[in-house]
Image (cartoon, rainbow, N blue to C red):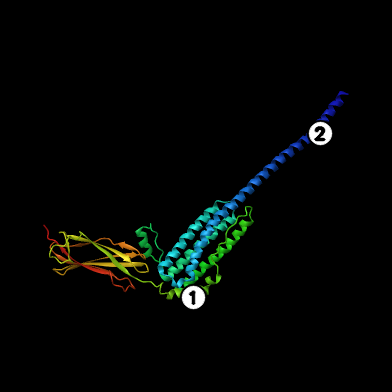
Amino acid sequence: MPPRRTRRRARRRSSARPVTFVVAAVVVLAILVGGLTQVSRQSEGYRTSSDRSLAAQGTVAADQSNATSATVRRVLDDLPSQTRQGLQATLDSAVQQTSLQAARAEIAGGATPLGLVATQFAAVFADRAEAMSQLRAAVYGFLGMQPIAPANAPTSATSADVTSAAPVLSATQATNRITAAGALLTRSDALYRSVRRSLAAAAGHGTLPRSVWVTDPQVWQVGSVAAQVDLLATSPTLAATHYVVLRTVHLNPPALPTPQGAPANVSVLSPTSQIGVTVVLANQGSSDEPHVTVRFSLANQTTGATTSRTRTTSLLLAASVTLPEVTLRVKPSTSYLLTVQLILPAGQTLLAGTATQVPLQVAPGT
């Protein structure tokens, strides 16, 4: 009898083990499912937040882009009547603004885990920035213009930019490049619409404003662009004018007060063996001047001997520059005639302010 009870207890223990394992498995599975559900909920919340964050930052970029496009569109609609200075200011500003917008869009897209949508969002503004750079390069290349140097640009870099100006483009080249810029803008508009739809359909249902650069595709077609380029070539307000002047001429040592009885136009200098002459040039025309030369001549009024020097520089539109000092040998108790003359740039016909003569009298040595 005792052996049978032992076998029954063993059978009861062996049949209870599967039930225990099943219960444990169910508990573990419930924990895993609950954890995955929680992670899924948290992940969905993160995606929703990311969608809305990109939409918020994208709205700022789109509004700024819309403002830039409106300005560019107004200028392009009336391009032949623009002035060189006005056109230059608008195109330079458009390039700077779209470059900043592209940088901000790239940062905004990189801060979200939205993958393709974020990449496309950044590409929209990068395309618009590239299109403005292409448009400016085409117009400037055709009209022989250069971008305005930033206010903090070093003088040496500014001069180098003028000297190494890109060659002037033909009408056909300018037309093709402007048309390519229009195609890039059209592509950016289509990509922006795709991003806008994707964000609206995503978890966060982010909303972006409309942003369109090409409101009339015909304007950017080859035929229309070619007609505009032809009008640029004949526009009187966009024609280049050349007018460089001598703004100031300084002597070192400076002139003394005119002695009583001496001619008023004679500059009397203290006894010295040399004088320094410094000139400030100003560009009052409507185009950059890559090569400007000034001739300095000092004629001895007693012997007739003449000494000459030249200085050459480049001048941006509306800029001024101080030439390096020119040193000339003199003798005490001698009269001289100093002539400072601008060698006129090609195309300049105005003569006012391009030359000056200064009679000099070096005082006797003591």
Within 10 Å of disc 1 (Cα), the crowding (few <14, some 14-19, many 20+) is: few
Tag 2: amino acid: Ser
Give the residue drawn at x 51%, y 74%: 224
Is residue 240 shown left or right of residue 57? left
Q: Determine which quarter of the picture holds residue 197.
A: bottom right
Residue 227's tag is 1
* The C terminus sits in image quarter: bottom left
Give the residue drawn at x 51%, y 60%: 65
User: Which residue position is annotated with label 2?
Assistant: 15
- Percent across and percent down for residue 297 are 22, 67
Residue 184's tag is none
First along the sequence among labels 2 and 1: 2
Within 10 Å of disc 2 (Cα), the crowding (few <14, some 14-19, many 20+) is: few
Q: Secondary structure at mark 2?
A: helix
* The N terminus sits in image quarter: top right
- Percent across and percent down for residue 114 are 59, 53
Q: How many marks?
A: 2
